[in-house]
Amino acid sequence: MTDTHNPPALKSFVNGITMFRVLERPAFSAAQNALFPVYFTIQTALPAVLALTYPGSRSLLGEHAGGVGGLLQESNRYSALLPIATMFVTGLVNLVVVLPRTVTVMKARYAQEKKDGKKSYDPAPHSQEMQALNKSFGKMHGISTLVNLAGFIAMIQYGFSLAARLD
């Protein structure tokens, strides 16, 4: 379920760490810059697909609607709607808030590298400007990781919710 429903969790906790260890910094950065928009778009779109395809159910108490109508039923508010909404919001936050801000910081770091004649990841000392940019980049990276963790937890919750419905 991780690969299919929350690729940014895989990205944060497996792909990113592995690529960071095996790639040179410029190649790692280029790969991440190409992958992030795709990951975050998928992270945003898949919960919408989950909402549209939410399975209805039949029981002794009657039939329950599927799709968005089923999600909006009061009985599904916490078990399905909340996790799916959380997954959607985390993807959207990454796509429209975190990613653009991170790109802005990265561009500023590249410009500062040219001014300083030193890469942002070279050993210290760094200019005060680069220190501030590195701190800002680290903060954005941390925010994205926490957002991904929230989406991952919501995905696990939704998985348990679906599993509980199996007869």
Image (cartoon, rainbow, N blue to C red):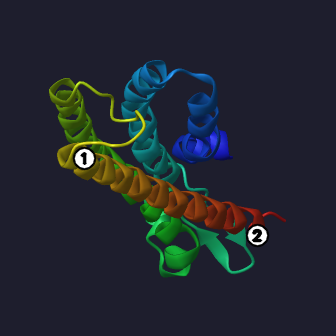
Q: Which kind of residue does numbered mark 1 sit on?
A: Leu
- Report whether residue 153 is seen: yes
124 or 9, which is in the foreground? 124
Discs 2/1, front: 1
Say whether marks 2 and 1 touch (CB < 8 Å). no
x, y percent for residue 26: 42, 20
How packed is label 2: few (under 14 Cα within 10 Å), some, or many (20 or more)? Answer: few
| Dot 2 amino acid type | Ala
Query: Which label is found at residue 32?
Result: none
> Label 2, on which residue?
164
Q: Residue at x 40, y 33 (%)?
A: 122
How far, Cα to Cα, is label 2 from label 1? 47 Å
Quarter that holds the C terminus: bottom right
Q: Would residue 37 be found to the left or right of residue 14 on screen?
A: left
Identify the element where label 2 is drawn: helix
Q: Is residue 130 left or right of residue 120?
A: left
Q: Position of residue 120 (x, y in %)?
A: 33, 35
What residue would you read off at disc 1? Answer: 133
Q: Point out residue 112 in the picture as x, y percentages from the top left corner.
A: 18, 33
In the depicted view, which residue is nearer to us: 45 or 97? 97
How many discs appear?
A: 2
Q: Is residue 77 above or below residue 85?
A: below
> Which numbered disc flags the more N-terminal residue, 2 or 1?
1
